[in-house]
Image (spheres, rainbow, N blue to C red):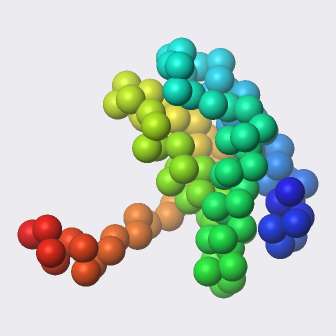
Amino acid sequence: MLIAEGFQTARALSVKFNTLHNLSDALLSKQPHYDWGLRSVKSVLRVAGGMKRANPDLDESQVLMRALRHFNIRKLPIHDITIFLRLINDLFMGLTIESKVDEDLKSKIV
């Protein structure tokens, strides 16, 4: 599916993606709303494809890392977030991505 979304380095990224999902399933607390199955895989990869098309100059590893973080952080309780972020940082070693901030929304809140 990474290839269908336009990723050139799909093979290497798919190994990282699969490893993250397997480790998340094994290491994170068991929650009834967690879904590490095919439905989640498809959803994350579609989000990654949309991000890739929106940011064609961004490195593909950074795009996938951001999609994984963005898609999964929302459903994790605080005690699992630190574990999940460490897993991502270990799998995408040396990569850093800045968080996107909606300045318009931020100005309306503050």
At x 46% / y 43%, what residue is drawn?
73
Measuring 62% from the left and 71% from the top, which residue is drawn there? 51
Q: Relative to residue 22, is residue 14 drawn left or right?
A: right
Q: Is residue 20 above or below residue 64?
A: above
Q: Looking at this rendering, what residue extends furthest in the top direction?
A: 30
x, y percent for residue 42: 75, 49
Relative image position of residue 4 (x, y in whole percent): 88, 66
Question: Which residue sits furthest bottom?
Answer: 57
Q: Quadrant of residue 98?
A: bottom left
| Image mark count | 0
Residue drawn at the location 56% of the way across and 28% of the way down: 34
Res 94 quadrant in image: bottom right
Quarter occupied by the C terminus: bottom left
Closest to the observer: 74 or 17? 74
- Relative placement, left or right, of 21 versus 10 is left
37 sits left or right of 110 in the view: right
Residue 13, image x, y percentages: 79, 54
Above or below, comparing residue 32 to residue 102 in the picture? above
Q: Quadrant of the N terminus?
A: bottom right
> In this orientation, does residue 59 appear?
no
**Is residue 77 visible in the rendered structure shown here?**
yes
Instruction: Tell which of 38 and 85 is nearer to you.
Output: 38
For the point 51% across and 19% down, which residue is it? 31
Which residue is outermost to the left?
110
Q: Is 4 left or right of 45, judged from the image as shown?
A: right
Q: Quick one: 19 or 41, which is closer to the camera?
A: 41
